[in-house]
Image (cartoon, rainbow, N blue to C red):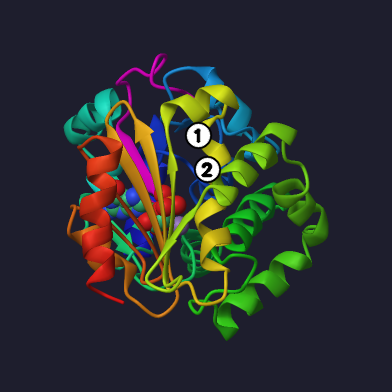
Amino acid sequence: MEKEILNLIESSSRILIITHVNPDGDTLGCASALKTYIGTKADILIQIKDNFNFPNTYSFLPHINNSKNLSNLNDEYDLIIAIDTASKDRIIDKAKNIFEKCQNTIVIDHHKTNSGFGKINYIKGGISSTGEVLFDLFEKLNIEISPDMAKGLYSAILTDTGCFKYESVTNHTFSIASKLSNIINTSEIADLCYTNKPKNLILFQNYLVSNAVFCLNDKIAYTLITKEIIEKYNAKDEYTEGICETLRSISGVEIALVLKETNNGVKVSIRTKEIDATIIAGKFNGGGHKRAAGCTIKEKINTACDILLKEAKALV
Ligand code: 5GP
Ligand code: MN
């Protein structure tokens, strides 16, 4: 299958790399590395309507600053590659339309719940990150990893493994990190990912952690992000990243939930310790990984919270 992917990339004249909605370090790092490899005939799509929600944290990654968004996207592509995208629902609006119409599509991913919605599906469920999957793909194809490609791949792996903390991290993950550390300065990348945050992001996150609700002897912790609070802190989408992990990091908490009010329903983040988070996400057509999953509930935030808590309480 690797050769098939390479042939398709080489024979296509216009390629679009699609990152998933609410882009994180994994999808953006991989898109950056892939675009660096493919060159000028590839574009990256970040699914934002305007530049307010541009993911600034990752703007240090090569080419991310010059990505397409939903307002300047056209349909001139003969190959689309969806990267780190767990399901077709993580591609929205116009982009989904273009994806469905495109003659050739490739899905590169690591979500176990990904059913494979591309023409070619390169999905390695359970691997630490799409960064790891992509690194292996490059290696199998004897493609040399340049410093710019290494930046993206390392950022992808670092952020999606919670800095090499999660159980999906294996000996192989470390061996890739070791190879990448011969090409780039890894602590510099970690600083760019983690010690360069806007002040408002920290204040916003502190507010949400301070206002968290604990139930069932602290086994469940949740916090609600209303539109009001988003406005108060002028919070971008990326400001939400990490809050759910903070709640989970509390001793005794088995399930952490973050509910965020959006124009298309309530976006839910689920983080767990032992419990399978995809069981809860799956009740609402979502998915993800055992300890990190998500879904969207098309209800008002308080109703969404009630029905979500019912599912969570049934598992602890
Ligand atoms: P997050 O809470 O950071 O948005 O997502 C956590 C994990 O769950 C990620 O791996 C993400 O891909 C997955 N995920 C989040 N929301 C959804 C969703 O609505 N559908 C599916 N299938 N996966 C999701
Ligand atoms: Mn990922």
**Residue 69 among those drawn in magenta:** yes
Q: Secondary structure at mark 2?
A: helix
Residue 40 in which image quadrant: top right
Mark 1 residue type: Asp
Q: Residue 24: where, in percent of width, then height?
A: 51, 46
How many C-alpha atoms fall within 10 Å of the one at disc 2: few (<14), some, or many (≥20)? many
Mark 2 residue type: Thr
Residue 296 in sight in this render: no
Label the magenta part by its dominant secondary structure: loop
* Near-viewer residue (147 or 129): 129
The residue located at (26%, 26%) in the rendering is 93
> Label 1, on which residue?
237
Quadrant for ligand 2 reads bottom left
Q: Quadrant of the N terminus?
A: bottom left
> Label 2, on which residue?
240
* Near-viewer residue (138 or 295): 295
How many C-alpha atoms fall within 10 Å of the one at disc 1: few (<14), some, or many (≥20)? some
Residue stretch in magenta: 68-84
Query: On the rendered structure, is 225 left or right of 103?
Result: right
